[in-house]
Image (cartoon, rainbow, N blue to C red):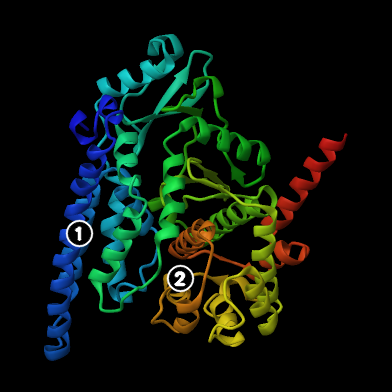
Amino acid sequence: MSDRDFPSDDNEKTLTGEGVGWERLRRSAPLVALSARTAGEAAVVGLRSKLRGADSSQFHVRTAERYAELLGGSKGALMKAGQMLSIASVAPVAAMEFQSIYQAALARLCSDVPPMAPELARVVLERELARPVVDVFAEFDWEPLAAASIGQVHAARLRDGREVAVKIQYPGASAAIHADLKNAELLATFVSLMMNSLSSRKVQFDLRGAAQELSARVAEELDYRLEAANQAEFAEYYRGHPFIHVPAVIGELCTERVLTQELVRGWAWRDACAAGQELRDQWAEAIYRFIYGAFKHLHLFHADPHPGNYLFHDDGSVSFLDFGCVKRFRRDQIEVMDAINRACLRNEVFGTWRACVEAGFWRSSDPVTPEEVFAVWREDWEMLWAQERFVMTPEHATRRLERRCSPNGPSGNAVRHVTMSPEYTVMARIEIGTTSLIAQLGGGAHWGAITAEHLEYAAPLTEMGKREQEYFKERRAASHA
């Protein structure tokens, strides 16, 4: 990665006034142009398909490659948006048979990021730590373990022998992202343009508030000190957990643009997806219990559920990485969601509708029936309500997203009238991302029993649930000793 890929740190201070406006235009213009071109081609391809039965797969391959190339070169918030889409089903946009094409192309945004040169990484590291690398580290591998949209990670060993992972932010990354986020609607524009250019099935969401919420979460990722504090909170809560592991943070070696933590090695996502069913089941349950357990007990969501943030281990445990994007909820917000899901679990149509009206998601005067509201939450979500082991598949995830998001889907009338606080935007992203990950793993578990644990305080039925219950019981006893 060269210095030209991002604005310099000096330029970061000058991106104000007219400069910001010009930067917004420069960065968004190629996206608008590509979307307009794609929309035109989509209309032609659709017409040919209807008249001649022509195969449209090559159009989707071409389009996916174009978006991946544009977003990969844009860096900043646009690249982050592409990474978000790479983990989620795109049912409202493209037919099921074409979704894997887009996911494969966009997935490269999570893995095929060119690293910055070792000399540049050293400059940033020494400037942030205010001392030479040799004074801090006994060994430092300048070949990065991973390179992402904001920074890259290196393996190292401290002078006391501890193995650590050191994340270094790219110089100028902050300027590039802040230039995007000065226009809070840029992410919304990206999603809207991409969706509406790929298909005649128009997705007509009001994304202004959602874009502002996503912008706030993306901006927080730029401060590694905040990330270190988030991670330390999770690490303490799950310290010694039987199958959930959060690496310890080395606080004295964390700055705004450098984060140092315990080094963890494990299976990467691609290898995990090819593992045996028993391991994939355990990993899927660990992910689910981590995501929703932290929400229930800490009022926190690890809000960046993509494959690069997990490492998988032979004993069925999972290590969770990257806490730059964490969403905190108030108790009343958690109680709102619990009330809706509890009514669904009990199969109460009017109870679900009433809880949604009290939450402000729909008004009692809206032309939406209680049955339609109930279907949004209950139907196509067999995973949560199943009374026996249920294996999640990509087809299930696709149907779920279409019902929850598409105004032309089976719950279209309810979707068109829903009003949801922008604060719940991150929750939707987490639900979509977590569901997609479990579906790609093909993870099976007694999900209904896990749901009953969280909502009804039922005794755990799964082996992992029993181990987790015993772990927290011992932690509580130790804290009162």
Question: Which residue is drawn at the image coordinates 45% and 56% (left, top)?
Answer: 275
**Residue type at mark 2?**
Ala
Residue 102 visible to an observer of this rendering: yes
**Would residue 114 be found to the left or right of residue 273 on screen?**
left
Front-lying residue, 185 or 86: 185
Q: Nearer the viewer, mark 1 or mark 2?
A: 1
Question: Which residue is drawn at the image coordinates 40% and 17% (left, top)?
Answer: 139
Image coords of residue 122 (percent x, y): 32, 19
Image coords of residue 338 (percent x, y): 68, 65
Q: Is residue 183 above or below residue 65?
A: above
Question: Which residue is drawn at the image coordinates 78% and 41% (left, top)?
Answer: 475
The residue singled out by tag 2 in the image is 397
Indicate the secondary structure of the residue bearing disc 1.
helix
Image coords of residue 404 (percent x, y): 48, 73
Residue 240 visible to an observer of this rendering: no
Quadrant of image for the N terminus: top left
Front-lying residue, 253 or 396: 253
The residue singled out by tag 1 in the image is 32
**Would residue 295 be found to the left or right of residue 306 on screen?**
right
